[in-house]
Amino acid sequence: MQRDLILGTAGHIDHGKTSLVKALTGIDCDRLPEEKQRGITIDIGFAKLDVGTAHLGIVDVPGHERFIKNMLAGATGIDLALLVVAADDGIMPQTREHLAILGLLGLRHGVIALTKADLVDATTREVVAWEIRQMVQGTFLQDAPLIATSVVTGMGLDALKSALAEVSARVVRQQTDQWFRLAIDRAFVVQGHGTVVTGSVASGRLRVGDEVEWLPLGERVRVRALQHHDCAVEEVHSGQRAALNLAGVPLERIQRGHELAYPGYLRSDRVVTVRLHTLPSAPRAIAHRAQLHLHLGTSEHLATVSLLDGDTVEPGQWGLAQWFVAVPIVAVWGQPFVVRDASAQHTLGGGHILQPNAKKIRRRQGDVLHRLELLGSDDPRQRAAMVAWFAADAGLELADLVRGAGLTPRQAEQIRADLLAEGELLEFTLPGTKTLLLHCDRVAELEQRLLQRLEQWHREFPSMTGHDRPKLVSEFHYLSQPTLIEAILDRMLRAGRLVGTAQRIARTDFQPKLSANLRKLKEKVIAEHRRLGFQPPEPSVFASQAGGNAAHLKELYEVCVLEGELVRINDEIYLHAESAAEMRRRLAAYFAQNDTATVAEIRDLLGTTRKYAVPICEYLDRLGFTKRLGDLRVRGPTPLEGTR
């Protein structure tokens, strides 16, 4: 069965990369007039070659140091490399730089071509070949086939094809069951068809008529037609070069570095967390807060680096870092990147993405750094758990695991189910049937904050058996999902860690403390409210009797309400519980015989005055016992009978 792979060339300028591709394929990758005129490759070019069971899409890159950014754009997504070294020149600066870049991009397979072999004698070829072997020691090419070639005489071309076939057979692609993604490396207009973009399909499949998300713009566009190496096709998949005809997209809006992806898969951001490596050959260390050129996918950005575990990453060393970029970028877990200095003259290093969507992390936080290390684990389950932890109260979605933990959708579904079953993920249903998945440690953190806040209130107001639940909830307004705290409180109530109602709440381990004087005052307050019925005393009446406890009078009333002795009508009027029950009984009997009631009729029914009747009517309206229609009250939806 034929396999689709992307082959990328690499090597110094004028070492014969483009000529070699033409000799192998018959295709001239220099398509620009300037390239023809100057005889050098300026931008990336494309060809195709069938070798063995592999169908290779070839990306030919420029070798001049001024066009390294174009080389990097072309090297994105390649599966194997063809490193080209001219026998008459030998190893040159861009030979080494391109080799370093390929290593930073995570390449594992490749072939070395010694070009222009007809221009030197056998001894010189052997010496140059030995120098190349020394150069590639310790790299992914140390055991790669090295073939001497000549495009003039045809020397080694068949052997080179055989070597490419052999190496291609060892390449393993694991992205066929992933969602679709393509980084745009070229865009143009075809007369009568509109805008066409090209790129290497990094993952997944795409069919004509599918809708894709255009990033970082976040817009959705329809794929009108597809081509693979100038042939119209119905579908393209990972490992292929593809041209996409997009419906309704003006050319001037498209840039190299934009991406097309399965809707919801990628999310653009200005901050990413990475594992950063400085090349041993780098002229200097990478320093905290340095501004450098970040090459990611087919894009290039001037970015600021924040080193999380030190002040520098010395040559040959690794470190954890964050990149801050002025414009949004898109990435996935494990994606490689390359870093060049501010003048874009030297490649300093690279690394891979740990968090494609990150929040700013304070430096030298031991626990967070440890979790970032776990995020770089080879264990997909551990990575998924860390993605959930870093999501915090925003919650976790399937796409977060696919994008942030390097999982396929099927893997993500299974691991999500496993984490839920094991209790490492907790599920909360919020208003509107929205389901939120949180890491258990994040839930525990929120629960601890709630308990600490209640403990503080209990210390400040030791006589109150409970505190205002809505007020407690409001203190967590900063959460991504404001209604989450209500769900967590309900969970704690079910678990017996809290006690309370929809209005009042307390820690289970709290016992209110009333002094002997406050207990006596409480008894007097309750007795007076029972005696006076529907014309109860105002709290201020007891201020003089409270003496030194006057400051605790409001707390005392709250205790009486929570214990069911009094019912709050408003902040100044409380009814004894027996009076409140009698009020509902009388109203129920009244409405059994009458459709409406005025304030005056309710006043007379209760034997009180307007001073109390109006607040009582408003209280009844709030609770739904009655409903106001102009100056009249009718029976409300909440039953009067059997309630307290």
Image (cartoon, rainbow, N blue to C red):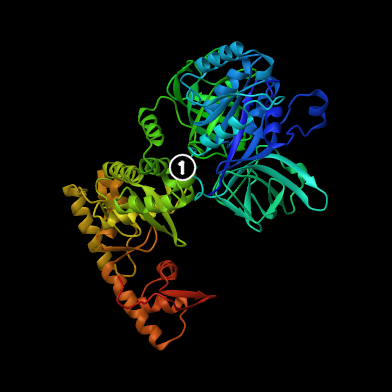
Q: Amino acid at mark 1?
A: Gly
Q: Residue furthest bottom?
A: 593
* Residue 171 in view, yes or no: yes
Asked if 111 appears above or below 262 in the picture, the reply is above
Image quadrant in which you'd find residue 387 = top left
Q: Is residue 581 above or below residue 391?
A: below
Q: Nearer the viewer, residue 471 or 376?
A: 376
Residue placed under numbered mark 1 in the picture: 406
Q: Position of residue 357 (x, y in %)?
A: 51, 39
Q: Nearer the viewer, residue 607 or 169?
A: 169
Q: Give the camera-side residue of 588 and 118.
A: 118
- Name the spot of residue 287 as percent of width and height, x first: 52, 17
- Residue sitting at x 79%, y 53%: 193
Q: Is residue 196 above or below residue 294?
A: below
Residue density around tag 1, few if under 14, some if 14–19, many if 20 or more, within 10 Å: many
Q: How many marks?
A: 1
Determine whether, in the image, residue 390 is placed left or right of residue 223: left
Q: Quadrant of residue 563?
A: bottom left
Percent position (x, y) of residue 75?
61, 32
Q: Position of residue 123 (x, y in %)?
A: 59, 11
The answer to whether residue 472 of the structure is visible from this angle is no
Q: Which quarter of the rendered picture does the C terminus lie within?
A: bottom left
Residue sitting nearer the eye, 580 or 199: 199
Query: Which element type, helix, strand or loop, lies under badge 1?
Result: loop
